Amino acid sequence: MINFTATYTDHYQLSMAQVYFENGQKEHQAVFDYYFRKLPFDGGYAIFAGLENLLEIIEQLRFSEEDLDYLKKQDYSEEFLDYLKNFKFSGTIMAAKEGDVLFPNMPILQVEANIIEAQIIETILLNLLNFQTLIATKASRMRLVAGERILLDFGLRRAHGPGGYYASRAAIVGGFNGTSNVVAGKDFNIPVSGTMAHSFVQSYDDELTAFRAFSKGRPNDCVLLVDTYNTLKSGIPNAIIIGKEMEAKGQKLMGIRLDSGDLAYLAKESRKLLDEAGLTYVKIAASNQLDEYVIKSLLEQHAPIDVFGVGTNLVTGDPDGALDGVYKLSFSNGTPRLKISESLSKVTIPHKKQVYRLMNEKGELIGADAITMREEEQVSRIYDPQEILKSLPVKNCSTEALLHLVMENGKRTASSRTLMEIAAYSKMRLASLPMEYKRFDNPHIYKVGISKTLKKERENLLKKYKK
Amino acid sequence: MINFTATYTDHYQLSMAQVYFENGQKEHQAVFDYYFRKLPFDGGYAIFAGLENLLEIIEQLRFSEEDLDYLKKQDYSEEFLDYLKNFKFSGTIMAAKEGDVLFPNMPILQVEANIIEAQIIETILLNLLNFQTLIATKASRMRLVAGERILLDFGLRRAHGPGGYYASRAAIVGGFNGTSNVVAGKDFNIPVSGTMAHSFVQSYDDELTAFRAFSKGRPNDCVLLVDTYNTLKSGIPNAIIIGKEMEAKGQKLMGIRLDSGDLAYLAKESRKLLDEAGLTYVKIAASNQLDEYVIKSLLEQHAPIDVFGVGTNLVTGDPDGALDGVYKLSFSNGTPRLKISESLSKVTIPHKKQVYRLMNEKGELIGADAITMREEEQVSRIYDPQEILKSLPVKNCSTEALLHLVMENGKRTASSRTLMEIAAYSKMRLASLPMEYKRFDNPHIYKVGISKTLKKERENLLKKYKK
């Protein structure tokens, strides 16, 4: 649906690129880390999403003829424009697996490339990964409270324009079952669903006639929206009439949908009326400004809701507008690099790195990952005993390297994973994270440590810069 | 950049369309109103944005071969798919002017079309207008506090994926001066700008060398980022050295940018140092989590900042994730239609409508718009004297109809307006809205009334439905 070209970037990337080019630095190799500093939703984890889309796009990213014509008018030299004409990303990318559970300040992805290519892809990388990770994380919170109930994305109308295309995909990574978004369904192979709108009911002279027309047209997935006039006095009684008419034809009414009013009360009363009529198999769907807290509350009240349709609060990530992911230089032209800040937590970590995760015998995450230099391979050297080892039962633990080679010389190194594979992986991974990191209120803080060797490297570099 | 086809819609639009089609209702004419119920940001107005894009897209909207192949696998009849193959929007649209200031519960746009076409375009209409209106409104709030200072959109990296493409456009409608987003600059003819990143400074062995390289490569728009190591002890002194070197070559350093720390303090100290060095012309740009409140506070502290670069809080509309715009049926198959709700404010308004705005002799909005039936043309019949006329000085007022014909039989009726024309119109319109509606805290509520005739129509219809 979307044709990304290399002008999907910030102007300063091209300004810097031009300077590097004209300064003879275009072959300088750089390493950039992608990571975020703060977990969204005051939660205890994030779900990594967007990687497959990003790799596919980067592999094909070029400046189009139209892009070059435009840039020609923008005060760039002929030589630089010639260079851009042949631009393609030829670097290497290491990344965590899409769907994995991640924590602040750990490198999620590392780009190694010449500095021009690494800069030009920065914006699209942040744009796609920040957003999908935000939404997948949000979706996963609803999955945590919804148990095995059906979760559907109804958000396209409130999404940020075409951002909705990727929101629907990210929702699946985070554990949703389907979407109303047809183009996302088509392109990402997501089950699509949806019922009827109020306008459908209104467009007939009475509700029963509307329901009957719909049941004839969609006998296999007939879900009736019952709140256009009066849910309990009109909507449900009419739905029951239709349910009975369908039974007489050997069909089954699939469900009813509540979209306003007190959903807990209406679901209970609706269930009662449907059950009394013998329509125990008819499902109850609910929508209207749902989020993880409302779903949790509804289920705590034992509202007999089988399907939740979530819109705005899913696809916009409300109340958090963005994940604060950043892309920081950690190595350039043969030298480790640092950005200094007043607070130590914002000082970047130099060098090419790897992240190791500790798991117990059951394969559960024990609450500690460790950032090491890429070359440190021995577990014994990974942890700074002062900060981590002492507090954790690390014997009998296994470690897993989180960053994998996904692109080499601009080419993907592995075939793409399907969305359903990613969602299944994410589900498994989230299940292995203990509940105390997943609770909504004051979740336990997952430790991310830095290896002794790397810490020493950073301190030395800090000293050097401060001089 | 984006190829919208007619599967950019919700699944239920197609389900309903199929039922209408098979029920012989495909020629039933319907009228839908687009409006929102709640102003974003607890503000007093909204800026309408996205219309030009929407009209351009709707005029071209078709199901592609790929779409049809996909739908063929989705349990639709051969006849219905044949109908979709020839789908194009052939209806009529009345709309407010893009850039106008708007208020809750007034129809902003009305679609008159056969019910299938009207339903299929619902999702894309809501998706594009809700988002751009949100962002244009947010941008206008920053413009209100920034006065004549430069406002730049730096948000693409934190935008909701490709939603950022339209966010950059909407920011201009709301009064921004430029963007860092190159593809939006290209496609919407927006001035692009941007300076350097921390990575640029880090990639050199020292800051001065980095600055010097940049000033040579970009002498005409050289803005130096001064906070990589230490703003006042290193960044500004090095920028002054470069400024002097540029002067010696007959060039001028354009500016410096602050991106961390206490921006008010650093701007004042930086200004002092630059002025003492004779670089009074060097502009100060600031960025880092700005929004309308931070900009207001900085200027109240007399921070000498000339340029504000705004990212996340602009392009995500934080803290409001979405405008709650809806699309409601008001007329169908020859009959006015209503949706009932427990609260009267959520009961829809039937019929084709027009909106009139009252202005005083100076052309200022006096705080009252009125919704009438389309046919009511006499001002004397517009207002319900009980609710509005009494409280307002309406003599010597002029009225203006807000809804204009923009599409007829699927074709645009007027040539498109450029983004700069829209921005200029919005600026003029916002200037004519008195300050009490624009203040951030408890803004005055702009009255939107319903004409006597229309009110009576609605009451009659309500009575009928309640029976």
Image (tube, coloured by chain):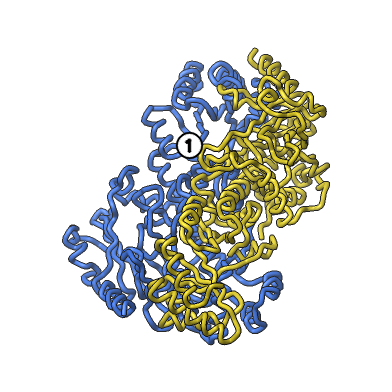
Chain colours: A blue, B yellow
The residue sitting at 38% across, 56% down in the picture is A38
Tell me: residue B184, above or below residue B60.
Answer: below
The percent coordinates of residue A354 (x first, y second) are 34, 70
Residue B39 falls in image quadrant = top right
Disc 1 designates what residue?
Answer: A290
Kind of residue sitting beneath label 1:
Leu
The residue sitting at 37% across, 51% down in the picture is A428
Q: Nearer the viewer, residue B153 or A152?
A: B153
Side of B123 where A410 appears, left or right: left
Q: Quadrant of the C terminus of chain B?
A: top right
In this view, the residue farthest toward the top is B467
Q: Quadrant of the N terminus of chain B?
A: bottom right
In this view, the residue farthest toward the left is A390
Residue A451 falls in image quadrant = bottom left
Chain assignment, label 1: A
Element on which disc 1 rests: loop
